[in-house]
Structure formats: C-alpha cells, structure tokens
Amino acid sequence: MVDATRHDKPTLRLSWVSHPARREPLKAALAIIVAIGMAVSVTLWAGLWLGALSFIVIVASVHGFLFPVWYRIYEDHLSVQTFFGAQQRSWKAVRRSDAGKHGVHLSPFSTPNWLDGTRGIYVRFGDNREDVLAAIDGMIESAHGERASSSRPSATSQLDDQEQPAQPNLGRHRLATIKPRMESRAP
C-alpha cells in the first residue's frame, strides 16, 4: 500500500549563510549609530514612542545587512530565511538573473523592468560566489529545459572578439535570461 500523505522532500543542492555585518564591522557600527542617532532625534522632537518606532523601522530596513540570512537552493525552488520572515521562489518563476559584485538578483521578468526591485530576490554570495552562480545556472536550466544564456566567458568558447555578440550595458553583469516559450495549439 502506498502512503498518500507521504511527500518527497526536494533535494538540497546548496546551503549557506550570508552575514555582511560580520564581514564589514565598521559599516555595521555606522548603521547602528545612524539608527540610534535618528531615534534620539525623533524622540526629542516627537516623543519616545515615535523614537522607538523610527529605530525599529531603520533597523528593519537594513536587516539583510545587520543580521544573518540563510539561503538554500533546492532542485525545485530557492529558500531565503531571515529573522523577519522567509521567502521561497520556484525556479520556473525565475526568468532572468543578474550577477553583481556581492550577489545575484533573480527576476521573474525576462527583460529589465521597473518592478525588478519588488518582485525579484537578491541572493548574496557569502564566501562561495562560483558555487552559487553554478547552482543557480543549473537550476534555471533544469527548470526551463533549455540552456540559460550567459555573458560570462566560457572556457570552451571558440569565437574570437569580432564574432562575439554585443551585450547591452545594463549596469550589471547579465548572468542568464530565459525567454518564455510560445506554445502553438493545434485545433
């Protein structure tokens, strides 16, 4: 008899913790000093309750820097957990990834969009940039069933500089773009 309530857990591919404040303690100290200074200013101007609220709002706005963030890459989704909550994003929902200096932005849009900042997820590398990029490339490729386009130089690339297609300067390194497929429907 097969147990109908049994759910297979997705396979964990990569897991890491990113804590930028530990790596850059001077910036963390500056952020805390600014938060305390703003809270004291607001307390003197508007009262204790608004001062406490301003401190909470400022600390919450930089929580991804001050507190550790746990990342887990599964074969079917990405999980991001902070002290303030958790997010999950299916690899099928990721259409574009843009790698930067400290992390990679995963977007549900295939082209740059003004909603990228609110609909996407920013994944910090921590100390394992290449592992994270390789895992994300692999998960996007397997989720969409096609090779993700990449502007990173390939070791097996045989094209010389004149044959390389021009990449638009989007301010960040484009890692991968997945374009939605148009499926034809036969009557």
Image (cartoon, helix red, strand yellow):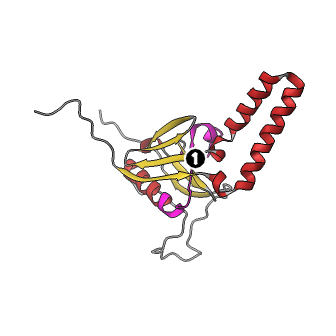
Q: Position of residue 141 (x, y in %)?
A: 41, 54
Q: Position of residue 115 (x, y in %)?
A: 63, 38
Q: Position of residue 9 (x, y in %)?
A: 31, 42
Left/right of residue 13 with respect to residue 59 in the rendered view: left
Q: In this picture, is 109 found above or below 45? A: below
Q: Secondary structure at mark 1?
A: loop
Q: Position of residue 110 (x, y in %)?
A: 53, 46
- The image quarter containing residue 78 is top left
Q: In this picture, is 33 found above or below 124? A: above
Question: Dot 1: few (<14), some (14–19), or many (≥20) neighbours within 10 Å?
Answer: some
Where does label 1 land, which residue?
68
Report the quarter where the N terminus lies: top left
Residue drawn at x 71%, y 32% as measured from the top left: 56
Left/right of residue 182 with respect to residue 124 in the rendered view: left
- The image quarter containing residue 36 is top right
> Residue at the right extreme?
45
Please state which of residues 80 and 89 is positioned toward the viewer in this rendering.
80
Please state which of residues 109 and 85 is positioned toward the viewer in this rendering.
85
Please state which of residues 178 and 130 is positioned toward the viewer in this rendering.
130
Report the quarter where the C terminus lies: top left
Q: Which residues are magenta?
A: 110-132
Amino acid of disc 1: Pro
Left/right of residue 61 with respect to residue 154 in the rendered view: right
Q: How many marks?
A: 1
Please state which of residues 15 and 139 is positioned toward the viewer in this rendering.
15
* Residue 181 at least partly seen: no
Residue drawn at x 45%, y 56% as measured from the top left: 137
- Residue 185 belongs to magenta span: no
* Residue 76 at least partly seen: yes
